[in-house]
Image: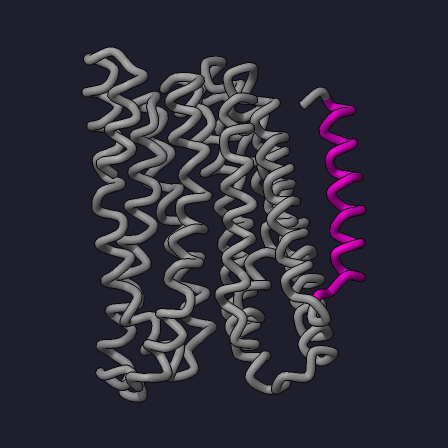
Amino acid sequence: MLCVVGVLSLTLSFDDWVWTSTALLPLAAVPCFTCLSTADMARLQLAGHWRYVSGARAVAAVVALVGGVPVAVLSRSVLGASVTLLVAETAFWLLVRRSVQTRRDVVTTVRGQEARSAFKSMQAYSLLAWIQGQADRVLIGGFAGTVALGLYSVAGSIGRSAGDSIAAAQASVLRVDLTNVGRDQSKIRSVVGRHVRSGMLLNAAAAAPVLGVSFIVLAPILGPSWAEALQIVPVIVIASIPSALSWCAAPVHIHLDRSRRALWAPIAGLMVAPLIALAAFSSLQLAAWAVLGREIVVALTQLLLMQKAAPWREAAIMGALIVVSSACCVALGV
């Protein structure tokens, strides 16, 4: 958080820096609630309540949208995105905390070595993935200004919330299914492929409501000043398609004890962040297409890292879906 504020201080006037830093202040509390929810989430997962964890994450995403969109409308700044993230993590922590307290089959002390081993092996991966997700926002704020950052953040919140919730749920269920197939990579590939196919269907089903809410409900409410943000929502929705594959890859790396090798995927995504910021300096539409390109790069990197467990047939179907969807966006002038 201090690094973000420091970068902004070099690129903004004092008044803009004070307001932007204040708007970003809720983000400082996000890691705190994430840490609080991690232990309870691990307890629920070890007790086999993966479905509840996935549902809690989805409910938290919906609550975050309900709480964050009005703030974005009223403040017309990045404060809306900051509040959205804070509400999402707070709501998720409250849900899993209450569940742990009320369920009798959940142990109050996690089986030490098993949970700690998996957690430590993915710490660097999770950190890099988080940096990858935030780097483009920081750079956009520096290169294109706070207005572009606010528009980009709102578009990302609207376009990615449903897809990320679905992907997180798929990854949680995939972890359970992988425990039943051992280390046979052909069986792993089959299980992963099944989850990727179901994820694509769910993303396609969620796209219509997301676009409907964006253009039918939010457009009249937000007015013409937010039209540019809503215009790139379809491209952000498409970016959720390859992102779903990346989410499914992480449990595979953990299952095969190849967590260190997985670090190259978020590093590849991080390398694209400056290109997204430069694109945003030209237009938000170009930045949205750059985000789609980054997600494709990360997904391809994950496929290569998964080696024989990679579901290439489903990846080809996913590629075709991305091409067709992108062609429709171009035809509509997005």
Query: Is any part of residue 171 visible from this angle?
Result: yes
Residue 41 x %, y %: 34, 70
Residue 67 x %, y %: 32, 40
Front in this rendered view, residue 321 or 60: 321
289 with respect to 165 (left or right)? right
- Relative to 219, say whether 169 is above or below: below
Query: In percent of the image, x 58 and y 29: which residue is there?
Result: 288
- Relative to 172, say whether 79 is above or below: above
316 with respect to 152 (left or right)? right
The number of numbered badges drawn on the structure is: 0
Residue 111 x %, y %: 30, 86
Query: In percent of the image, x 71 and y 80: which residue is there?
Result: 187
Residue 233 is inside the magenta segment: no
Q: Quadrant of residue 253?
A: bottom right
Query: Is any part of residue 205 visible from this angle?
Result: no
**In the rendered view of the protein, which quadrant contains the C terminus?**
top right
Q: Name the colour scheme.
A: one colour
Q: Quadrant of residue 53?
A: bottom left
Give, as a single range, the part of the protein colored magenta: 310-332
- Relative to 326, say whether 61 is above or below: below
Main SS of the magenta part reads helix
Query: In percent of the image, x 25 and y 15: which residue is there?
Result: 16
Residue 21 x %, y %: 22, 27
**In the rendered view of the protein, which quadrant contains the N terminus?**
top left
44 with respect to 332 (left or right)? left
Query: In percent of the image, x 67 and y 62: which residue is there?
Result: 196
Residue 326 is inside the magenta segment: yes
